[in-house]
Amino acid sequence: MSLLKVNDLKTWFHTRSGVVRAVNGVSFSLEKGETLGIVGESGSGKSVACYSLMGLVPKPPGRIESGTAHFDGQDLLSLSENQLNQIRGKRISMIFQDPMTSLNPYLRVEDQLIEPLLVHGMTDKATARKKALNMLEQVGIQGAANRIRMYPHEFSGGMRQRVMIAMALITEPDLLIADEPTTALDVTVQAQILELIKEMQQRMHMGVLFISHDLGVVAGFCDRVNVMYAGRIVESGSTHSIYYKPSHPYNEALQQSIPALQPKGKELFTIEGQPPDLTRPLNGCSFAERCVHAQDECRRGEISLKRLNEGHYTSCRRVQEGDLKIGV
């Protein structure tokens, strides 16, 4: 049985401008010990999908319209707030994008680290303090015994991110959701953070949902990848197949946009146009207006993910029908 199985998740925001269909029928699964990457442009629905699982979507204006998210036999979307509180921070932990706004500036790092252990009644305060110190050492913070009593502003960006990881892993969760965990970090620190998460994952055998817009990072870190656009998954498959055998024009365009892969001296490739207005119902392929391969038929009817081969799915109708081969 999968550690996490999400089916037809829809999370919409009811605003004065209309209903924003931020996540519109997303389905995926995650196994124990596996890392699943979710990639796409800003606004594609990556973070909202994962916030929905944690019950962190602001209500109002947000509302989960439909779907299920079974975690170890329990549907997270149907649990009460009290039931979710028994899971969040204990069996499911999250690393947020910006540690400076996620850490409480008024509390010492030690107090924030031990809080999950005490809230869930996992140990006494003295043991919790020892575990917090040990966790800081494990995440590579030098002089942890002295720094554990410091405040967040006394740490560098990379060190604050390490503190966030320590806080997320101190309860040894079954599932870790990492939302852009390497944003704003330099390349050296980024590599150290990713290596740290991977080491912890292997030791704890936990599943990892890794949200990122950095395709290079995802390529070297994840086992499988879901490509999201306009609130939907448009392609899904193993990391190898997503990168070496792309089967959706949006995935192809994303990879063409990676600066390191573009010829020197040439103008950088960009995807022309803008994502669709999610307050309006989409007819046909959501990427059609920006797609160089689009035909009239792409703008009509319902388009859904279909299997191409073992574990590889695409929502591109032309690829499904064998009329188009991407990257050839």
Image: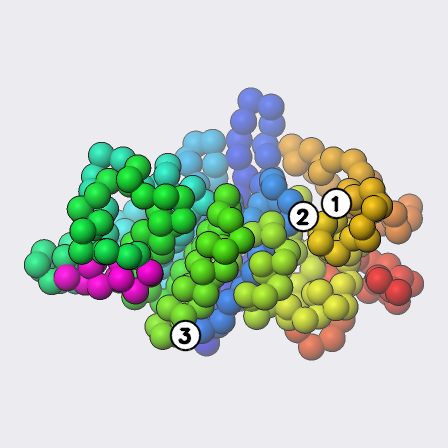
Give the alpha-carbon distance from disc 2 to disc 3, as whole Å: 30 Å
Whether residue 94 can be seen here:
yes
SS under mark 3: helix
Where does the image place residue 125, in percent across and percent down from the top left? 9, 56
| Magenta region includes residue 90 | no
Type of amino acid under label 1: Ser
Give the alpha-carbon distance from disc 1 to disc 2, as whole Å: 8 Å
SS under mark 2: strand
Query: Do residues under tags 1 and 2 come within 8 Å of each other at their CB atoms?
Result: yes
- The residue that mark 1 highlights is 286
Left/right placement of residue 278 relative to residue 116 reads right
- The residue that mark 2 highlights is 229
Where does the image place residue 199, in percent across and percent down from the top left? 41, 70
> Camera-side residue: 7 or 152?
152
> Camera-side residue: 132 or 222?
132
Q: Quadrant of residue 310?
A: bottom right
Q: Quadrant of residue 74?
A: bottom left
Give the alpha-carbon distance from disc 1 to disc 3, as whole Å: 37 Å
Q: Quadrant of the C terminus?
A: bottom right
Mark 2: few/some/many CA within 10 Å (<14, 14-19, 20+): many
| Mark found first going from the N terminus, 1 or 3 | 3
Left/right placement of residue 35 relative to residue 148 reads right
Mark 1: few/some/many CA within 10 Å (<14, 14-19, 20+): many
Q: Residue at x 47, y 39 (%)?
A: 63
What are the residue bounds of the magenta stretch? 130-140
Q: Residue at x 8, y 59 (%)?
A: 126
Type of amino acid under label 2: Tyr
- The residue that mark 3 highlights is 202
